[in-house]
Image (spheres, helix red, strand yellow):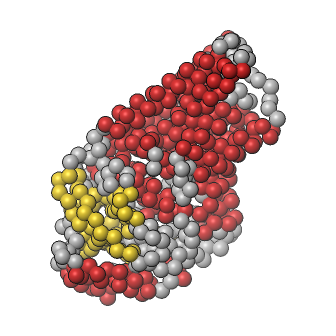
Amino acid sequence: MSAPARPGRIAVPALAAGVLLALSLPPWGWWPLGLAGAALLYWRLAGQRPRTRLWAGWLAGLGCYGPGLMWARAFNWYGAVLLIALEALFFAAAALLTPPRRGRAPAFVAAYTLAEAVRMTWPFGGLPLGGVFLGQAGGPLLALARLGGPLLLTAGVWAGGAGIASVVSGLATARSGRRRADPWSGPWSGAGSGTVVAVRGAAILVGLGLVIALASLAPEGGPAVRSVTVAVVQGGGRRGVDKEQVDPATVLAAQVRATQPLLAATPAPSLVLWPEDVIALAGPLRGSAQGAQMADEARRLHTTLVAGVTEPASPTTFRNEIVAWGPDGRIVGTFEKVHRVPFGEYVPYRPFIAHFANLSEVPTDAIPGHGTGLLRTPAGPLGTLVSFEVFYAGRSRTSVRTGAELLIVPTNTSSYATAQVPTQEVAADAVQAVETGRDVVQAAPTGYSAVVDQRGRVLERSVLGRPELLTATVPLRRGFTPYDHLGDLPFLVLAGMSLVVGWAFQRRDARYS
C-alpha cells in the first residue's frame, strides 16, 4: 500500500468531490458535475488506508449533503447540522467498503449504491432527498430508471465516475512514462499499467453506454389507451411559512379563486387536481361545510376533483388524506399518506425528544396510512404519491402494478422559502415517470406544479408563489417497464455480489503483493 498522503491532499479533493455531486442536484442541477464528483472521489480513495478512506468518505458526504440538504434548516439549524453530519456517514461507510487497489471499481459502485439503498429506507423510513440520482433527471443516465429505478440510476453515476477517473488517471500515468501500480489490476502490473487502467476505464464507460442504450429501448409504459384533460390548480401565496401561520380559510379561498376560470372551459377537464392539505379541518370531512363546498365545485365543473385534506383523528393525531369527488359530487376515493415526513408531520420518539427540542411547530402527529395509492375515479385509475412519497420508487411501482394509468402528486412545499425542495421534487417526478412509464401531474399550493411525460420531460411548470392554472392533455397507459416487473431486488443482489467479488480480488492482491 502506498505511503499515507498528507491530510490536505485527501481532505480537499474529497470535500470537492462531494460539492460537485451536490451541484449536480437541483436547483443548481448540471448533471455532468455528478460524474465529475464521483470520478474525483474514486481517484482520491485509491490506495488509502481504511481510516483515511473513512474520513475522506465522510468529508465527501459533508460536501454533498451540506448543500444538498440545506433545506432542513427550515425546521431548525441545529437539527439540519446534525442531519447532514449523520447522512454523511453513509458516504463514509461506502468509502470504507471500497478496496484500496484490485477490485476497486466494482466494489466502489456497489458500496455507494448499497449505501444509498440503506439511506433511502433508514432511519425513520429513509431520506431520498439529496440523493445523487436526482441530479441525473436532466441527463442521459435517466433512461436507466426504466430498468432499475433510482438504484440503477445511482449506480450509473458511480460507474461513470469510476470509468472517467480510470481513463484520466491512466492516460496521465502512461503519458508521464512512470511505472505505477494499476489500482484495479494490482501492484505487480508494472510498466504500461497506465494504459491498461485507461483501457479498462474506457470499457466501464462503454459498458455503461450499452446499458443506457438498452434502457432507452426497453418498454416505457406501452401505447396510450386514451387521453384525459387535466387541470392543475395552484392557488399561490407566501412561501417559507408554516401552516400554523396561515389561515386555512385563506388557502382554500385561493384555491377556489384559481379554479374559477375552469367554469368557462369547454369541454370541461376530466380531472382537476388540487394540492396536498389545502383543506384543513377542525373536525371530520363528512358533514363539514368544506366537504359540501368541494362537492358543489365538482358538480359545477362536472369533473373529478382531487384535493388534499387534513382532519383530526384524536387530540394528538391527524390524518393527511387525498380525497376524490366525482362529477356528481360524491366522494369516489380516499387515500391516506403512507410515508410521513419525520420531524415535519410527526416526531419519532416524541416523549424522549421533547426533553431536548421545542416541538411546538409539530404539535400533532400524522397517522401513517395504508394501501397502494390507487384511486379509481371516473377520470381513470390514478396512482397517488403524496408529497414526500414522490421520492420513493416503491410507492409508484405498487400503484402501477395494481392498475394506475396516470400518476398524481398532490404536494405542499410552502414551508420552504427557497426553490431547493420544489426543484428536487420535480426531478423526482421525472424519475418516477421514467421508471413506471406513466405521465406525472403535480399540484402544489405555491409551486412547483408540473406536468411530466413518461420519458421524464417537463412539459409544463408553474412559477413559485403565483396563482396559476396549468392544463394539459395527458395519456393513460397500462403497459409496464422492466422496473415495474423487477423492482429493486435484482440490482441489490447484483450490487452485493459485486462488492464481494471486489473484495475477493483485493484479498488475492494482498496475498501476492
Corner quadrant of residue 491? top left
Is 206 or 385 nearer to us in this picture?
206
Is 265 or 418 nearer to us in this picture?
265
User: Visible in this render: residue 61?
Assistant: no
In this figure, what is the number of numbered marks?
0
Corner quadrant of residue 242? bottom right
> Residue 205: x and y, percent?
50, 29
The residue that appears at 65% across and 27% down in the rendered structure is 169
Residue sitting at the far front:
175
Whether residue 493 sits left or right of residue 460 in the image: it is: right
On screen, 19 above or below 474? above
The residue that appears at 30% across and 38% down in the rendered structure is 218
On screen, 360 above or below 147? below
The residue that appears at 59% across and 27% down in the rendered structure is 167
On screen, 256 above or below 111? below
> Residue 341: x and y, percent?
50, 63
Whether residue 86 sits left or right of residue 330 in the image: it is: right
Image quadrant containing the N terminus: top right
User: Visible in this render: residue 11?
Assistant: yes
Corner quadrant of residue 513? top right
> Residue 315: x and y, percent?
48, 79
> Residue 399: x and y, percent?
30, 54
Whether residue 507 sits left or right of residue 204 in the image: it is: right
Is 246 or 6 nearer to us in this picture?
6
The residue that appears at 45% across and 70% down in the rendered structure is 463
